[in-house]
Image (cartoon, rainbow, N blue to C red):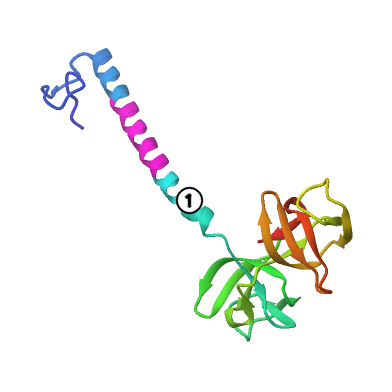
Amino acid sequence: MRVRTTFSKKRRICPVLCNPSRTATWIRKAATSAASSALIALTALSTSLMPAAAQAQEFVSIKGNSVNVREKPSTRSSTQWELSKGYPLQVTQRKGQWLRVKDYEATLGWVHAPLTSKSPHMVVTARTANLRSGPGQKHGRVGQLKQYEVLQTLKKQGSWAQVQRSNGQSGWVAKNLVWGW
């Protein structure tokens, strides 16, 4: 290690610790400066990656009437669970024709990509939720949704989503009561 007499590369190198208190101060300054630079670099890196990660939230929905979610990306892999048409899933990874997905409870599995659709759907996560005539609590209730009910997403407006039930009835639901997109 080269120890200099002051905090500058232009200053002479001390063959022996010249003045221990000054040298220790310089080392502290250098370490603080390096740590600050590293922290700034890491902050810049994480900030530049954050928007990409936030935008990377990709959702798909089940296309077929019943689709197997598997433990591994292979038809030979065991089935973890089965999902019905429209159920929304968040894509966390791609491997060939397979998607690693998670449901609203953060349970992970693999699904064959051709069995999914980009058609936006949501699933009711609350025990019950009101389906309203407009986007807001001031609008009248037109129906009641049950937990795990799958809804097709028609439109988003602020913290509300216009959805359609499997029976064709449409209305608005608060986004904090559903999961998907």
Magenta: main secondary structure equals helix
| Image quadrant where residue 71 sits | bottom right
Above or below, 137 against 26 in this view is below
Front residue of 168 and 85: 168
**Helix, strand, or loop for circle 1?**
helix
Task: Report the number of discs.
Answer: 1
Point 44% across, 44% down: residue: 47
Residue at left offset 14%, top offset 22%: 14
Q: In the image, is residue 5 above or below residue 171? A: above
Is residue 137 part of the magenta span, yes or no?
no
Q: Which residues are magenta?
A: 30-44
- The answer to whether residue 105 of the structure is visible from this angle is no
- The reply, left or right, for residue 52 in relation to residue 113 is left
Residue 104 shows in this picture: yes
Q: Residue at image x 71%, y 59%? A: 179
For residue 149, what is the image quadrant? bottom right
**Spot occupied by residue 33 in the image (x, y as percentages of width and height):** 31, 28
Q: Is residue 52 left or right of residue 103?
A: left
Residue 133 point in image, percent of width and height: 82, 57
Q: Position of residue 54 (x, y in %)?
A: 53, 53
- According to the picture, the residue beneath numbered tag 1 turns out to be 51
Depth order, front residue of 142/121:
142
- Kindly identify the amino acid type of the residue bearing the numbered disc 1: Pro
Is residue 61 positioned above or below 114 on the image?
above
Q: Quadrant of residue 110?
A: bottom right
Left or right of 59? Residue 51 is left
